[in-house]
Image (cartoon, rainbow, N blue to C red):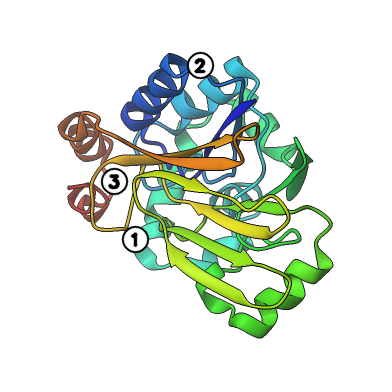
Amino acid sequence: MKIAVLSDIHGNFEAMREVLADADHLGVDHMLCLGDCIGYGPEPEEVMAEVRRRAIPSIIGNHEMAVLDRVHLNWFNPMARTSLEKTFTLLSAESMDFIKRLPYYQVLFGCRCVHGYPPDSAQTYLFQKAAPELRQAFLSMAEPICFIGHTHNLELIHFDGRQVERTALAEGITNLAPNDRYMINVGSVGQPRDGTNHAKYIIWDQDRSCIEVRFVAYNIAATVAKIEAAGLPLAHAKRLW
């Protein structure tokens, strides 16, 4: 069974559309979404509508938390707050109702899905955790694999029962040891921060015990034009390139 795992779409419907087309072409059986579908980008409603239309199992991200309770806006820098204030005005009642029902984590297909850090944090960053804390998290987690987003950077953390090893993930296939444990940061569909401007997502092949990192090209110029037209901070457009 092949499962596509997406995260941090951030209102970039141009990127999302190409990622979904890529996953459909490769014949994935299921899709999962790790949150932050909104914020930064110009088309949060289109992204949320497509998640609903496809009934993609999803969890809450820190940007969704901010549209539900504005006290969380204090957690963001000024540009991100400006973006979220605009995002409030772009979301339909149906999307807001969907966001209200998002859980902080899900366990699906034998893996844990959380936006930031297991077991259920949408705000903690993976890079904030050192090896001893990661080891304890692995020992506390019932599932052998936890998929994570939030940092916008691809990363694999491997625990063999003794040592914790952190590795940056590159494009292509990485084999997983069947008896070991992993935290896998799947990168960002809509706003990658790893030095390349492709949309990123992961396909988890359970039968072959491997993951494939997919780099997908999309029409960046179209997203940039939409950011400018929406009156969002131009920095959100510039860093897409």
| Secondary structure found at label 3 | loop
Q: Is residue 189 above or below residue 72?
A: above
The label on residue 79 is 1
- What residue is shown at x 80% (from left), y 70% (from top)? 139
The label on residue 27 is 2
Identity, as a three-letter code, of the amino acid under mark 3 = Leu
Is residue 20 shown left or right of residue 227?
right
Image position, residue 205 (x, y; %):
58, 33
Q: How far apart are labels 2 and 3 at the CA level?
A: 35 Å
In depth, the one of 51 and 73 nearer the eye is: 51
Is residue 228 shown left or right of residue 183?
left
Identity, as a three-letter code, of the amino acid under mark 2 = Gly
Q: How far apart are labels 3 and 1 at the CA level?
A: 9 Å
In depth, the one of 179 and 199 nearer the eye is: 179
Q: Which residue is mark 3?
A: 232
In depth, the one of 180 and 187 nearer the eye is: 180
When asked about the image quadrant of residue 160, the answer is: bottom right
**Which mark is in front, 2 or 3?**
2
Query: Dot 1, how many residues are within 10 Å of its Cα: few (below 14), some (14-19), or many (20+)?
Result: some
Identity, as a three-letter code, of the amino acid under mark 1 = Met
Query: Dot 3, how many residues are within 10 Å of its Cα: few (below 14), some (14-19), or many (20+)?
Result: many
When asked about the image quadrant of residue 137, the answer is: bottom right
Image position, residue 234 (x, y; %):
20, 51
Give the mark nearest the N terminus, 3 or 1.
1
Image position, residue 104 (x, y; %):
73, 50
Image position, residue 207 (x, y; %):
65, 31
- What residue is shown at x 34% (from left), y 36% (from top)? 42
Query: Dot 2, how many residues are within 10 Å of its Cα: few (below 14), some (14-19), or many (20+)?
Result: few
- What residue is shown at x 61% (from left), y 68% (from top)? 124
